[in-house]
Image (cartoon, grey):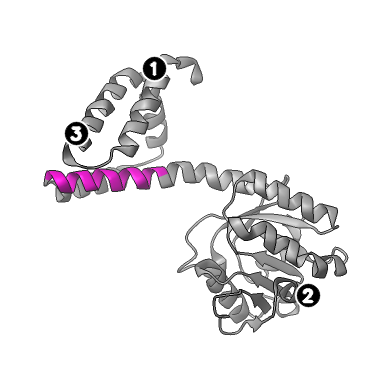
Amino acid sequence: MTGAAAWTVAVLGFGEAGADIAAGLASSGLRVRGFDPVAPTPAGVEQTASDADACSGADLVLSLTTAAEAEVALRQSLGALTDAAGATVYADANTAAAGLKQRLAGIAADAGVPFADIAIMAPVPGLGYRVPMLVSGTGAQRTSEILSECDARVEVLPGPAGLAATRKLLRSVFYKGMAAALVEALLAARSAGCEDWLRDHLSAELADADATTLARLENGSYRHALRRSHEMAAATELLGELGVPPRMAHASQIWLQDLADQPSRR
């Protein structure tokens, strides 16, 4: 961490991720300033009076508010950022669509501020600021240089803001969709009186997954789309009988039927 103590990082937002990351960076030797209008300031972090106040004198700003508040936080920080004449990188680490990240990058660019789009790629609790991150945009390399001095795990993606967000959300389609399907299946199994069996079965299937699993799932969905759509129609009916809303089952039925009707989608 040579030179880490020379950096000043501002953290905007002390939710679960923001508080954990801010406290960790402070304990690593960085000077950390921060602001949250509601949440308490973590130990080791300098409390400030506003977003702009937190950004004043910072080398890097990490915005960890929410996607809904991301633009407001950036605009409220612009005064301090423009005073820095391009010396401060503004990095938005909120989970948001690529379009929002691109809009924020445009606002920053108009003010002459380097911008980084950070995608946090794993749960922060337990990892803190060492959570794997993807970063893109004009300020990506600078962001990586600063955080890497604290042994953060940052991968720079050559390209504009929005690129990191796109990769994170594409991953989320699978992981969060799988988690939602898992919850739905277990709730239905509980109603059917076989939850323990299904838990054991799914645990074994996940444990047996290997490098061939992805191709098998993808190819099988195309090859057997029509038959599987009928299977998921039956599953949808079963969940209805069990009193569990078949949201994921019915969505799967629609997707498989669509693949059967339009094989050219592949």
Q: Residue at x 79, y 66 (%)?
A: 88
Q: Secondary structure at mark 2?
A: loop
Numbered tag placed on residue 238 in the rendering: 3
Q: Quadrant of residue 226?
A: top left
Numbered tag placed on residue 56 in the rendering: 2
Q: Indicate whether residue 186 is drawn in magenta.
A: yes
* Quadrant (top left, top right, bottom left, bottom right) of the N terminus: bottom right
- Dot 2 amino acid type: Ser
- Dot 1 amino acid type: Ala
Q: Indicate whether residue 181 is drawn in magenta.
A: yes
Tell me the crowding category of disc 2: few under 14, some 14 to 19, or many 20 or more residues within 10 angstroms, Cα based.
many
- Which SS type dominates the magenta stretch? helix
- Dot 3 amino acid type: Leu
- Can residue 161 be spotted in the picture? no
Numbered tag placed on residue 75 in the rendering: none
Is 7 or 241 nearer to us in this picture?
A: 241
Q: Are marks 1 and 2 in contact (CB under 8 Å)?
A: no
Q: Residue at x 26, y 49 (%)?
A: 203
Residue 242, position in %: x, y? 17, 40
Whichever of callouts 1 and 3 sits on the residue coming sooner in the sequence is 3
| Gap in angstroms between the C-alphas marked 1 and 3 | 22 Å
Q: How many marks?
A: 3
Disc 1: which residue? 260
Residue 57, position in %: x, y? 79, 76
Q: Quadrant of residue 28?
A: bottom right
**Would you say 166 lies left or right of 158 here?**
left
| Gap in angstroms between the C-alphas marked 2 and 3 | 59 Å
Magenta range is 177-192
Tell me the crowding category of disc 3: few under 14, some 14 to 19, or many 20 or more residues within 10 angstroms, Cα based.
some
